[in-house]
Amino acid sequence: MYNSFLYGNGLKVYTLFELVNSVEKVNNSGLYYNDFMKILLEASYHQRIFSYLFYNYWYCHICEELLSNRKSQNIIKNVCNKFLDQLESNDKIFTTNFDMIHDNYFNTKHLHGSFAYPLRNAMDIKYRDIDSKSFEYKFLLGTNGLEKLKRIDRFKEFSDTPFNRDLFYNNSTDYGHMLIFGLSFGRVEVMSDEFYEQYSEYEDLRLVKSVDGHIILKLELLLKQAKLTKITLSYYSETDVKNYESSFINSPLKEIIEY
């Protein structure tokens, strides 16, 4: 039995796979997540804001084409129940995902915000102005943990912040044994192996080296405060395990992680 649950894109991919293989009437255009991500990465290379709109539009598209019928909802409910059956309660469920696919069944806390739905115009993805020339989005695409943390921290005092504050700023919660599913803690690809070889002082900076380094940093703090006793990391292949071991090789969390 787990006391808390943190999930990422892996659960979305698994759920969409179950849906696409179970629902008879599926429009294949834009529904397959891996193909979509390739298009998104290409779009973001040409214009940042376009990637936000395109990603949000994709979610609205699958809501209309795939998620809106009763059969789809039953499949999603069954997926969620597999996890709820292993959880002590439904009140410590966190995600880095922007979609609300599981929100009807999980009491989900979105760490990085959520898509605008329905999406009526381009400005629906805007959260707040930062200054006269820039603004923050309702969901957070970012290069590394440091950038994400700074952007989340900027609005932590606002009651309407789209970035759930419980995990990062509530220091009284005990997370006990946490299950982590579908979150890779992948390495930031902006910097090459050659960079770390030449500047070894940056090798151990998990906050900037990992795309979710801010989450690693918070989990380490929870461990230090005795608010986290154990982590179970789910994996798909042995390659996943090796990647996880590499991500946590210099972290005190490695002592409480099981696979």
Image (cartoon, rainbow, N blue to C red):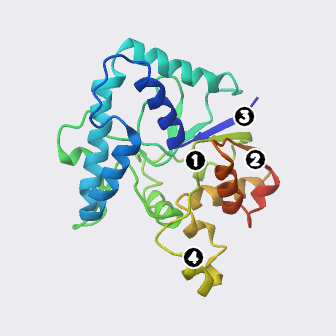
The nearer-to-camera label among 4 and 3 is 4
Q: Position of residue 92 (x, y in %)?
A: 63, 35
Residue sitting nearer the eye, 12 or 127: 12
Q: Position of residue 156 (x, y in %)?
A: 47, 54
Residue visible at 50% across and 45% down? Answer: 164
Q: Which residue is mark 1?
A: 183
Q: Are marks 1 and 4 in contact (CB under 8 Å)?
A: no
Helix, strand or loop at label 4? It is helix
Q: Would you say residue 86 is visible in this rendering?
A: yes
Q: Which residue is mark 3?
A: 3
Q: Position of residue 14 (x, y in %)?
A: 51, 33
Does residue 186 appear left or right of residue 249 in this picture? left
Residue visible at 28% across and 34% down? Answer: 60
Of the image marks 4 and 3, the number of the one nearer the N terminus: 3
Q: For the residue marked with disc 1, what is the amino acid?
A: Leu
Image quarter of residue 136: bottom left
Q: Which residue is mark 2?
A: 228
Image height check: is 131 above or below 227? below
The nearer-to-camera label among 1 and 4 is 4
Q: Which residue is mark 4?
A: 193
Q: For the residue marked with disc 4, what is the amino acid?
A: Asp
Q: Are marks 3 and 2 in contact (CB under 8 Å)?
A: no
Of the image marks 1 and 4, the number of the one nearer the N terminus: 1
- C-alpha separation, residue under disc 4 versus residue under disc 3: 37 Å
Q: For the residue marked with disc 3, what is the amino acid?
A: Asn
Helix, strand or loop at label 1? It is loop
Of the image marks 1 and 2, the number of the one nearer the N terminus: 1
Tag count = 4
Q: Residues within 10 Å of mark 2 (few under 14, many from 20)?
A: many
- C-alpha separation, residue under disc 1 versus residue under disc 2: 18 Å
Residue 74, disc: none
Residue sitting nearer the eye, 234 or 17: 17
